[in-house]
Amino acid sequence: MPKKSKIHKKVKKAKVVVKKQRATRPPLEKGKVRVFQTLRGMKDILPGEGKYWGFIKRKAESFADNYGYDLIETPILEETSLFNRAVGSETDIVSKEMFSFVDQGGENICLRPEATASIARSYVQHGMVNLPQPVKFFYFGPMFRYDRPQAGRLRLFHQFGFEALGEGQPIIDAEIIFMCFNLLSDLGLKVNVQINSIGCPRCRESYKTKLVNYYRDRRSSLCEDCKKRLVKNPLRLFDCKEEGCAPLKEEAPQIVDYLCEDCKNHFVQVLEYLDEAGVPYNLNPQLVRGLDYYTRTVFEFFQEEIAGDGGAKQDALGGGGRYDNLVETIGGRPTPACGAALGIERIILKIKETNANVPALPAPEIFLAQLGEQARKKSFSLIEDLRRAGFYISHGLTKDGLKKQLEIANRLGAKYALLLGQKEVLDGTIIIRDMEGGAQEIVDLNRVIQEMKKKLTNGKIANNV
Ligand code: HAM
């Protein structure tokens, strides 16, 4: 019973919060229906944005295919305690930004703030340790963090990412960094990598002692959050965004000076691979990343121009690192692993800011315009025949006037229009109109596919997608 009463208390508390939020909405005039809005920090992806999303998704998928990262989809809802354990209860993500709630069954669940913990959970749950290692995953999907919304910082945002579980070699760290660097370059962005090593739990212990001693003498200059961090999780002192704490971070002892021999060798090898591949990077001793599961290599990607300032004035486009202890932390066998995730909204912001070249959505090859009910019926199945034959086709089935339909064909940039009216249906013909020159010819309706193949070949016909 005590369990139930605890849950009831939580639900009661949640209700109070909801009531408070509702109270902040302007009162509704009697008899009026409220126009609903997206929640704060959440956005609709609207028409016109599709070309950016499609461009990034296609590119990311092609990199995943080429580098052998297989698609994984995990549920958006998970047990809250998965992230408490994996990401760490003292991190900002877990302590301040979780969308967590008690469901109807009394279970404490949350909208995932990130995907690495879920993928590690899936790896353990499905016994993937028995597959040939490393098991390489690719994902693309929404994440949720109750952060203060601002440009590039949303409560609902999207990531795509790569995770390689079951391999501890430094070449994997380098491969993931190299792959993300190339991907961002292919998207038209010039990026710089910030990199650091935060060692393993063994070497981190002696470093933590040094760090705590350093900060203890300066405790009075710390913000309230940092005072707590100093006691609970000193490495998180580097996550602080308060200006007052920045000078202390600058002067703090650096973890790279405390790495054990194995961690040092690992880091040197990662850097050597990056040198070999010509990936530009900056060593950033303050980079510890805001998640507790990392070991050894950690890295972030920044737009090149501002990267020189340590990335302090801008948000990272992506980040990741090695997490050799995560699988064991959540109940699996010891499994070294490494991964990275990139933020899609931030990438789109940068693509727009830098006017990077984004291919427009492909124009239809054929636009089918019809006139009269019989022609509309005939067009209905003809469109599908043309699509199956491999053409990229659009149509004006809901429109009545021919002029209007040809205007649409023009706007869409269709190469050819097929015109089907009452007369053509009776004759068993169709008109092919070259949209550029305006030339028209009448062909047998049964031969329209062959005729269009001849015209549109130039060898290739658009793939059906
Ligand atoms: P993260 O640094 O928390 O790492 O997030 C990765 C990227 O997601 C960020 O660099 C940023 O582009 C984007 N992002 C994060 N929070 C927001 C936000 N509130 N609004 C918009 N974009 C955001 C992770 O999530 C780790 N799971 C990465 C990883 C994979 N480590 C190992 N494997």
Image: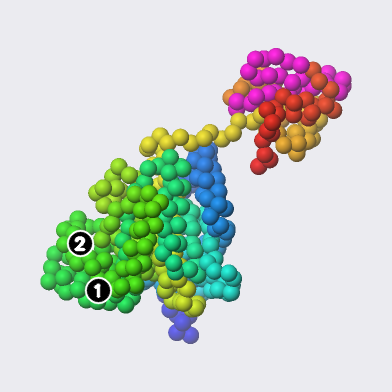
Tag 1 residue: 208
Q: Quadrant of residue 444?
A: top right
Q: Residue at x 67, y 35 (%)?
A: 462
Regarding residue 103, the answer to whether it shows in the image is no
Expressed as whole percent of the image width and height from the top left, the position of residue 26 reads 39, 48
Q: Identify which residue, 281 or 400, lies in the foreground.
A: 281
Specify start and end residues of the magenta stretch as a single range. 412-441
**Image location (x, y in percent) of residue 114:** 45, 61
Task: Give the class, few, some or many, for how many residues have Cα within 10 Å of label 1's Cα (few <14, many ≥20).
Answer: some
Query: As displayed, is residue 30 above or below residue 225?
Result: above
> Can the viewer see residue 72 in this picture?
yes
Q: Residues within 10 Å of mark 2 (few under 14, many from 20)?
A: some
Between marks 1 and 2, how big is the CA–CA gap? 14 Å
Q: Choose between 401 and 389: the one closer to the eye.
A: 389
Magenta includes 454? Answer: no
* Amino acid at the residue labelled 2: Lys
Q: Position of residue 126 (x, y in %)?
A: 59, 72
Marker disc for residue 249: 2
Asked if labels 2 and 1 touch by Cβ distance under 8 angstroms, the answer is no
- What kind of element bears circle 1? helix
Identify residue type, mark 1: Lys
Q: Image height check: is 284 above or below 293?
A: above
